[in-house]
Amino acid sequence: MKLTSSEFGHNESIPKKFTCQGEDVSPELTVADVPGSARTLALIVEDPDAPGKTFDHWVAYDIPADTRTIPEATAPGTEGTNDFGKTGYGGPCPPTGTHRYFFKVFALDERLDLPEGLGKHDVQRAIQDHIVDQAELVGLYAKA
C-alpha cells in the first residue's frame, strides 16, 4: 500500500495552508495498492515530536476501502477526536522547531462501526487485530 499527497512529498515540508498558520485544512491524500481483502480504511495523523507526548492531529475510520483520493478539506469516513479536543483535522502547529507529522493509513479486514468522536487509542485498540496492510507519509513543519 502507498500513501502520497499532491501537496508535499515524503519527508518534505507541509505547505503553510494546511497548518495553524494557514487555512488549517487537511491536504489531499492519495491511497494506492489497497489489498483486495480490505473492507475499510483508517487514518491517523500524529506528531511524535510534540512536548510531553505524541500529539494526535487527525483520527478517521470506517473510510470506504475503495477510497483512492481523500480530497483537500474533506472528512473521510467517521471522524475521531484529535488532541485539540475537536473532531476532524487539526493542522501542524509546533511550539518550537521542526516537527514530523506521520500520516498513517491502515487497510482493515472489517468495518469497525464505532461511534464518531473516539480518540486515537480507542481506534488503535479496535484495529489492532484487523490490519491487512498499512502505509505512511511523513511531512515536516516549523513555524516561520
Image: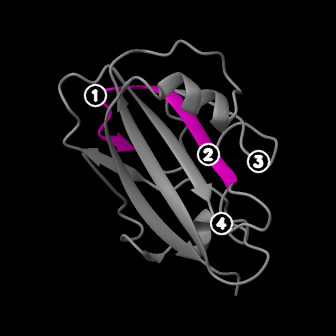
Nearer the observer: mark 3 or 4; the answer is: 3
* Residue 68 screen position, x and y as percent: 29, 39
Q: Which residue is mark 2?
A: 58
* SS under mark 3: loop
Q: Which residues are magenta?
A: 55-71
Residue occupied by mark 4: 19
Residues tagged 1 and 2 counted as in contact (Cβ below 8 A): no
Residue 122: within the magenta?
A: no
Q: Residue at x 70, y 87 (%)?
A: 144
Say what amino acid the circle numbered 1 marks.
Asp
Kindly identify the amino acid type of the residue bearing the numbered disc 2.
Trp
28, above or below 43, in the image: below
Q: Quadrant of the N terminus?
A: top left
- Identify the residue at horizontal 17%, vertical 25% (top origin): 36
Q: Secondary structure at mark 1?
A: loop
What is the x, y in percent for residue 95? 79, 75
Residues at discs 4 and 2 in contact (Cβ within 8 Å): no
Q: In this rendering, is residue 7 above or below 67?
A: below
- The mark that comes first in sequence, 3 or 1, is 1
Cα separation, mark 1 vs mark 4, equals: 28 Å
Q: For mark 2, does the 10 Å Cα neighbourhood hold few (<14), some (14 to 19), or many (20 or more) residues? A: many
Q: Main secondary structure of the magenta part?
A: strand
Q: Amino acid at mark 3?
A: Asp
Q: Is residue 95 left or right of residue 37?
A: right
